[in-house]
Amino acid sequence: MKVQVKFLASLYDITKVLKTELNIPDNATIKDLIQIIDDSVSPNFSKVILDDNGRLKDQYVILVNGRSIDFLNGLSTKLSNGDEVVFLPPAGGG
């Protein structure tokens, strides 16, 4: 199945990709997608957004079809064909 993936702001700087379509296995999760990104888009992407325990670092946000994975099943959120996943870096401000 295919999902649309977007990398915004500083994550674009890391991946050098703003938007891409990736083929993923059926029943893949966000965690699986991050591994696929490591393998096919940007090595070490997971090291940027995940902590040493494999959890999403607090300041990063992942949206699936506009909904934060915090309100879904976190990194275990299952993806469906045609989903849009957006990776957002920490917000700056001041």
Image (cartoon, rainbow, N blue to C red):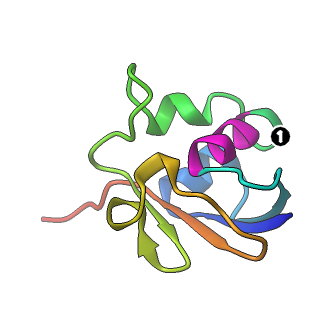
Vertical relation: 82 (above or below) 8: below
Vertical relation: 28 (above or below) 68: above
Q: Amino acid at mark 1?
A: Ser
Residue 17 image offset from top left, x and y in percent: 73, 57
Residue 19 image offset from top left, x and y in percent: 73, 68
Query: Furthest-left residue in view?
Result: 94
Q: Quadrant of the N terminus?
A: bottom right
Vertical relation: 86 (above or below) 60: below
Q: Which residues are magenta?
A: 30-38
Q: Is residue 31 magenta?
A: yes
Residue identifier under label 1: 40
For the point 68% across and 36% down, the residue is 35
Q: Residues within 10 Å of mark 1 (few under 14, many from 20)?
A: few
Mark 1 residue element: helix
* 42 on left or right of 77: right
* 6 on left or right of 82: left
Closest to the observer, 90 or 72: 72
Dominant SS of magenta comes to helix
